């Protein structure tokens, strides 16, 4: 059904919201106060036209913006965008009944995304390579991604297309993750399944042709022509194939700077959900660090980087599932500070143990404001004070937001 509506506000996922007799309607890529024509499908709608544009609207810089689901906010002027994103966090804290001032949004986009995941699909027997359309599995084919690092934005679609052509025989859906490292492109392919020896040999030839540093299938390394190194502080790390990495180099630097600044006086620090060590390797400039992460390969990569980097204080590693086996209160009490950087699900079990501990300082890093607020509320109920809350805009042009919270134990309250 085609109709005209007025947008009243913007939600946390960047959709505009219009009210109707049947309830809220969610419209992408609009702004408050705009009158727009939409094609409605239940509570969601497709934008047909902007009939009365907001003064906060600007022209998107990406030619794929209207069709692609990767970016959601390129139509917002910078000032409006910053205020909206900061309010996402402030509103989430209010809903959790947490009173804490939210600091100004920190831009951590830098040169752009250093990792892209492109999709290869065969819906009509022909091969389609690109990103997903909003709320759809339809592929929007792209030749370049302007929010990626300069060396990646044109090369990534070309690499994905070449790999798709090479593996198109079974016509299985593929997700191709391409990371720009110091030593070249690190590529991990998902969706293909086990490979025969002849197929692996042909992929080695393709990796040579594309000049890839490493090529893997579901984390299984097919060939490593050159270790794909990432600089973390003074250390050079080779993360496991397909493992977690902060989206931008600048984002990693900003988050690490906030973490190390908070922990500068701590003699011993526990870095929980440590990944391959972006915080641990920087914290070790001034503190002894115990790094804990579920993935054994990440712990091995961190340990290897630590041993190859002179001048760092001791880093110990432990492979442990912190969701099922969080560090217990007696273990935590050995540390002067604890850093948490969990996945989107948060660190509820670990926060409950920290709430009963004597740890003076907790630095919570999160990619989800809601789980950040939940975990912070647990810590505050246990006697911590939320001293600072910093929103970090690593995923620019999207509704995603990183949060850093610095919590210190209220000693008087703990004694009571």
Image (cartoon, grey):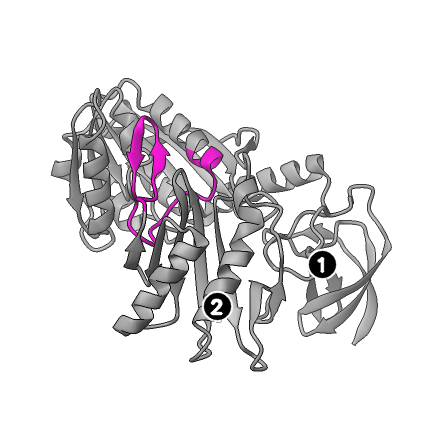
In-front residue for pair 182/361: 182
Secondary structure under tag 2 reads: helix
Type of secondary structure dominating the magenta stretch: loop
When asked about the image quadrant of residue 126, the answer is bottom right
Residue for badge 1: 66
Residue depth check, mark 1 versus mark 2: number of the one nearer the observer:
2
Q: Is residue 238 above or below residue 105?
A: below
Q: Is residue 259 left or right of residue 210?
A: left
User: Which residue, as the protein is rendered here, is positioned at the far top?
Assistant: 265
The image shows residue 109 at horizontal and vertical percentages of 55, 37
Residue for badge 2: 164
Is 233 one of the magenta-colored residues? yes
Is 31 one of the magenta-colored residues? no
Q: Is residue 71 above or below residue 3?
A: above
What is the span of residues highlighted in magenta in the rendered image?
226-252
Secondary structure under tag 1 reads: loop
| Disc 1 residue crowd, few under 14, some 14–19, many 20+, Cα 10 Å | some
The image shows residue 37 at horizontal and vertical percentages of 83, 64
Q: Residue at x 69, y 55 (%)?
A: 65
**Residue 12: which numbered mark, if any?**
none
Q: Is residue 41 above or below residue 16?
A: below
Specify which label sits upstream in the sequence, 1 or 2: 1
| Disc 2 residue crowd, few under 14, some 14–19, many 20+, Cα 10 Å | many
Q: Is residue 382 left or right of residue 68?
A: left
In-front residue for pair 340/240: 240
Res. 68 in view: yes
When asked about the image quadrant of residue 270, the answer is top left
The image shows residue 320 at horizontal and vertical percentages of 18, 49
Q: Residue at x 34, y 61 (%)?
A: 204
């Amino acid at each position: 059904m085609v109709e005209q509506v007025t947008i009243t506000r913007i939600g946390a996922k960047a959709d505009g919201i219009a009210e109707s007799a049947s309830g809220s309607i969610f419209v992408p890529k609009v702004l408050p106060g705009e009158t727009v024509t939409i094609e409605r499908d239940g509570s969601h709608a497709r934008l047909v036209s902007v009939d009365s544009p907001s003064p906060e609207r600007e022209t998107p810089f990406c030619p794929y913006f209207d069709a692609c689901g990767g970016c959601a906010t390129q139509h917002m002027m910078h000032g409006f965008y910053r205020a909206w994103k900061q309010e996402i966090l402030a509103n989430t804290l209010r809903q959790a009944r947490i009173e804490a001032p939210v600091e100004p949004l920190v831009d951590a986009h830098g040169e752009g995304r250093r990792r892209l995941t492109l999709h290869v699909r065969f819906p009509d027997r022909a091969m389609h390579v690109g990103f997903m359309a909003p709320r759809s599995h339809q592929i929007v084919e792209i030749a370049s991604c302007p929010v990626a690092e300069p060396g990646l934005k044109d090369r990534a679609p070309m690499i994905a297309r070449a790999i798709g052509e090479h593996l198109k025989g079974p016509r299985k859906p593929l997700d191709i993750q391409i990371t720009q490292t110091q030593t070249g492109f690190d590529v991990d392919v998902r969706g293909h399944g086990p490979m025969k020896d002849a197929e692996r040999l042909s992929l080695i030839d393709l990796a040579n042709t594309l000049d890839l540093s490493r090529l893997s299938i579901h984390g299984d390394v097919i060939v490593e022509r050159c270790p794909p190194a990432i600089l973390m502080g003074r250390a050079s790390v080779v993360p496991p194939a397909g493992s977690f990495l902060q989206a931008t180099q600048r984002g990693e630097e900003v988050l690490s700077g906030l973490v190390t600044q908070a922990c500068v006086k701590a003699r011993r620090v526990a870095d929980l959900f440590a990944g391959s060590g972006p915080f641990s390797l920087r914290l070790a400039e001034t503190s002894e660090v115990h790094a804990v992460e579920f993935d054994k390969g990440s712990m091995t990569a961190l340990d290897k980087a630590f041993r190859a980097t002179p001048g760092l204080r001791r880093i110990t590693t432990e492979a442990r599932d912190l969701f099922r086996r969080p560090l217990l209160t007696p273990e935590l009490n050995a540390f002067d500070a604890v850093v948490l950087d969990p996945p989107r699900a948060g660190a509820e079990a670990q926060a409950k143990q920290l709430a009963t501990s004597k740890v003076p300082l907790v630095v919570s890093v999160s990619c989800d404001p809601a789980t950040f607020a939940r975990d912070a509320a647990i810590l505050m109920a246990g006697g911590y004070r939320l001293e600072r809350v910093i929103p970090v805009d690593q995923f620019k042009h999207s509704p995603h937001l990183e949060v850093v919270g610095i919590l210190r134990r209220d000693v008087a309250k703990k004694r009571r």
